[in-house]
Image (cartoon, rainbow, N blue to C red):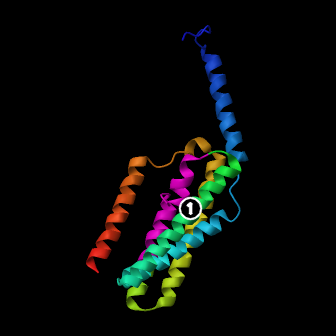
């Protein structure tokens, strides 16, 4: 199909690009997160860290059930919040699922690993209160990291709108499942 319009001159192209960037910035500023977004994600991560540490330390049937329950809680909260975001805004954002929910942002992943390591150590050695404290602290920092990413995204959507590549996410999920499989096999 041929177009009757000729090619854009440089000034028209620059104006079109500026209009598109302005529209993206307006859209980013107008997007809203569902109520209790950060607190529910932080709480779900805290539950997942605590139950994961408990399951790893107690690799009996009940421990593996606790571990799986924590993963299920997180997955349900993430799916519900993403669905609520979509209903509220009618749009998806590339980085929301990966950076905020799956914690691929640097601060979220660092906090998660540190909290999970401390909680697991505490679950193995016995100070169960430390397991809970580490889990809650990890969930709080994880939620705060999501808030931080959201503010950055709304301020500069072009710089923060990209999510992780699908291949990276698939590899991460496969590695996590392999780790859980190894835990079950080694118990």
Q: Is residue 87 visible?
A: yes
Above or below for 90 versus 57: above
- Looking at the rendering, in which quadrant would you find the C terminus? bottom left
Above or below for 110 versus 12: below
Residue 145 is inside the magenta segment:
no
- Give the percent coordinates (x, y) of residue 116: 44, 75
Residue at x 70% of width, y 51% of height: 88
Above or below for 63 versus 168: below
- Looking at the rendering, in which quadrant would you find the N terminus? top right
Residue at x 53% of width, y 70% of height: 73
- Give the percent coordinates (x, y) of residue 178: 31, 65
Majority SS type along the magenta span: helix
Relative placement, left or right, of 39 versus 135 is: right
Give the number of callouts. Answer: 1
Residue at x 64% of width, y 50% of height: 86
Quadrant of the image occupied by residue 34: bottom right
Q: Is residue 118 visible?
A: no
* Residue under numbered circle 1: 78
Residue at x 68% of width, y 29% of height: 19
Above or below for 137 versus 106: below
Residue placed farthest to the bottom in the image? 126
Circle 1: is it few (<14), some (14-19), or many (20+) Cα within 10 Å? many
Quadrant of the image occupied by residue 15: top right
Residue 104 is inside the magenta segment:
yes
Chain part drawn in magenta: 92-117
- Give the percent coordinates (x, y) of residue 13: 61, 20
Secondary structure at numbered mark 1: helix
Q: Nearer the viewer, residue 162 or 44?
A: 44
- Give the percent coordinates (x, y) of residue 55: 41, 80
């Amino acid at each position: 199909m041929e177009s009757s319009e000729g090619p854009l001159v440089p000034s028209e192209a620059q104006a079109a690009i500026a209009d598109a960037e302005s529209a993206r910035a307006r859209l980013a500023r107008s997007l809203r997160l569902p109520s209790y977004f950060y607190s529910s994600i932080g709480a779900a991560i805290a539950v997942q860290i605590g139950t994961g540490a408990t399951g790893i330390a107690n690799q009996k049937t009940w421990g593996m059930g606790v571990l799986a329950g924590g993963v299920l809680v997180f997955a349900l909260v993430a799916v519900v919040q993403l669905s609520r975001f979509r209903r509220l805004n009618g749009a998806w954002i590339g980085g929301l699922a990966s950076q905020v929910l799956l914690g691929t942002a640097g601060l979220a992943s660092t906090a998660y690993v540190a909290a999970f390591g401390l909680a697991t150590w505490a679950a193995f050695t016995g100070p169960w209160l430390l397991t809970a404290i580490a889990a809650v602290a990890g969930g709080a920092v994880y939620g705060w990291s999501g808030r931080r990413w959201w503010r950055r995204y709304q301020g500069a959507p072009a710089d923060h709108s990209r999510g992780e590549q699908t291949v990276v996410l698939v590899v991460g999920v496969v590695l996590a499942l392999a780790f859980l499989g190894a835990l079950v096999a080694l118990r």
